[in-house]
Image: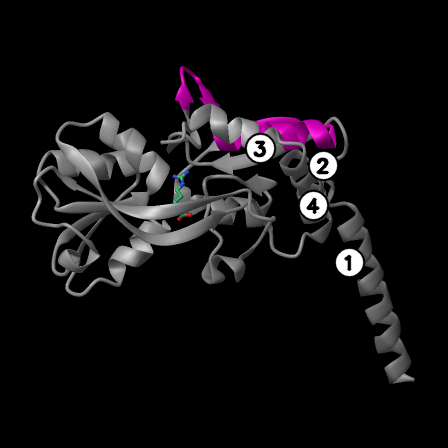
Amino acid sequence: MKKKVISLMLCACMAMAAVGCGGKKFDNPDKGEDLIMATNAYFEPYEYYEGDAVTGIDVEIAQAIADKLGLTLKVEDMEFDSIIAAVNSGKAHIGVAGMTVTEDRLKNVDFSDPYTTATQVIIVQEGSEITGGDDLVGKKIGVQLGTTGDLFAAEIEDVQLEQYNKGMDAVQALAGGMIDAVIIDNEPAKQFVSKAEGLQILDEEFAVEEYAIAVAKGNEELLDDINKALDAIIADGTVKGIVDKYITAE
Ligand code: ARG
């Protein structure tokens, strides 16, 4: 008898949980609703401010996905290391921020299919004694907090790690002689170096990475929608067109 009561209660709980699930409209926006993209808009050419508006490769890709899904794209700018939490808490539907797929991040979020590749590079002052990764031992290295560059730098022997909220802040510290090198993604590196004086990017490329769109862990429906739209705009050349618009081949 007692058993029956418990199982009945269990049923009621499950039914309530199911209703709760059906009500999570925000997770998977319906047509006409907002698709909220979390990003960190200090990462040219992927996302950056032009006046008051955030633009760049990631924003245009997200816009093309929103168009395919019949949604209105809204961009939320935040610290890079807040993006995964924003996506998981439902503050944003997607994280699009030149974000590299890593094993560690996959424990907390799901990633779409990759939409581009990138590398990590080393920026130094012109004429620096640092000519490759091996010379970084014991050096003062600047990174953007929470990025893969941060993770790589942390592994260097005797490193003096300097974490900045923005990549450009690290590059400015390097230009000002406060640190010895910066480890960061290759395309933003080019942009940052062009805006500072006396810096160069070393030829050696650290790691090849894939950028993808982050979605809350376990939200298969949304991930599926994003992947279908993304795959379509990769297949029809839209993504390549967007990338080529911002990145001119050497
Ligand atoms: N690709 C690197 C990472 O995923 C850096 C990304 C930084 N992105 C940004 N919008 N600030 O860790």
From what the image shows, is residue 238 above or below residue 183? above
**Label 4 sits on what residue type?**
Leu
First of labels 3, 4 by sequence position: 4
| Ligand 1 quadrant assignment | top left
Tell which tag, 2 or 4, sits nearer the viewer: 4
Q: Amino acid at mark 1?
A: Ala
Which of these two is toward me, 6 or 61? 61
Q: What is the quadrant of the C terminus in the image? A: top left
Q: Are marks 4 and 1 in contact (CB under 8 Å)?
A: no
Q: Position of residue 99 (x, y in %)?
A: 46, 45
Is residue 28 in the magenta section? no
* Range shown magenta: 49-75
Spatial CA distance of label 2 from label 1 is 20 Å
Residue 63: x percent and y percent?
60, 27
The label number, if any, that marks residue 239 in the structure image: 3
**Could you classify mark 1 by the number of other residues whose Cα lies within 10 Å: few (under 14), some (14-19), or many (20 or more)?**
few
Give, as a three-letter code, the residue at label 3.
Val
Measured as percent of width and height from the top left, residue 179 is found at: 12, 44
Q: Return the residue at label 1.
A: 17
Residue on which the image places disc 2: 29
The reply to whether the residue tagged 4 has its Cβ within 8 angstroms of ligand 1 is no
Measured Cα–Cα span from mark 2 to mark 3: 23 Å
